[in-house]
Image (cartoon, grey):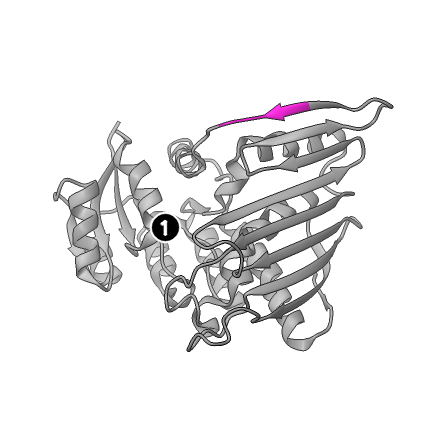
Amino acid sequence: MKPLRTAIIGCGGIAHRHAECLARLEDVQLVGFCDIVAERAIAYNQRYAGDRAQIYEDYERMYKALDLDLVYICLPPFAHGREVELACQRGIHFLIEKPIALTIELAESMAKWVEESGVKAQVGFMFRHGEAVQRLRAHLQDVEGTGRGFLTARYFCNSLHAGWWRDRSKSGGQLVEQIIHLFDLARFLLGEPARIYSMQNNLFHRDVEDYTVEDASGTVVRFQSGSIGVFAATNGAIPNRWDYDLRVIVPGLTADFENANRAVFHHTAGAWPSTTSIESEKDVFLAETLDLLAAIREDRPTAVPIQEGVRSLRFVLAAAESANRETPVELY
């Protein structure tokens, strides 16, 4: 089987996780790396492609020069432009990191281009592929479908991150750029949101120049099913740690998640609850790549199509709007 000629746009931090997976797959050939800082693309080429790929500082030039089958779009939120449109025009399948844009208008145009072109698109919500998440999703579908539950989610870290991340105009804020993973999981498990109220503030970085994003937030969501979600996030916790967890309570089951792969399910329907432990070392980045490759080979939908990126972006943008207006926001 002919390897898929693959390139990466944006050779920053998260792209390493994807490049590590792609470099060890026999049905993928890394042929191009693109970054506005050429030295970063060169370093990726040396590390992941044995110095055999081509280097570009402009993705449009790369698209024109290389006969690509697949591209990984690992750009920061503010940098999205025509990379999806041009990929679709050339029939190039892609994975795109979250959030897929900073405006719902650009996100919806991306979805339109994908639908019209027929390319396969995967959004980088890798937590959906976790073994424990998959088990709970299957349980919910077997019992009654998604909905009717209570969810609490926590994301605690403490890092200055990159300069663009600290600038709300470029990242959208911690909730939009980072906590979107947990909001997406809530949608995946409980269905679409109906009403959201978010409070956000900068409590811990007021003395940091140009730090305009929130570093603490509390958000409450009512879903269309009547389910409720509560989200707590901060960038003022333990330095150099990125801790997240969630608890999901549905009729007959309470699921305590350490992460997407590890959880304890408490079966609560009886008088004496029993437990099931899920412990997995699944590489969720590899899982989303393998699903994308299978979708291309088998001509089937991906696990997380571009429309999911649009919906989860709309969700977190509504939270940002709620915090800005200091009032609940209705969705859908």
- Image quadrant of residue 268? top right
Total marks placed: 1
Amino acid type assigned to the residue bearing label 1 in the image: Ile
Magenta-highlighted stretch: main secondary structure?
Answer: strand
Q: Is residue 215 above or below residue 286?
A: below
In the picture, measured across the screen, residue 101 lies left or right of residue 249, that is left
Q: Which residue is mark 1?
A: 14
Q: Residue at x 54, y 30 (%)?
A: 131
59 in the magenta segment: no
Q: At 42% from the left edge and 44% from the top edge, which residue is drawn?
A: 120
Q: Residue 109 location in percent, x, y? A: 48, 63
**Residue 313, x across and y down, in percent:** 55, 59
Q: What residue lies at 46% left-to-right and 30% top-to-bottom?
A: 282
Q: Nearer the viewer, residue 74 or 197?
A: 197
Residue in front for this viewpoint, 85 or 274? 274
Whether residue 256 is visible? yes
* Viewer-side residue, 243 vs 288: 243
Q: Position of residue 147 (x, y in %)?
A: 74, 43
Q: Which residues are magenta?
A: 276-280
**Label 1 crowd bin: few (<14), some (14–19), many (20+), radius 10 Å:** few
Seen from this angle, which residue lies furthest left?
Answer: 51
Quadrant of the frame with the C terminus: bottom right
In what quadrant of the picture does the N terminus appear?
top left
Name the residue at the right extreme: 271
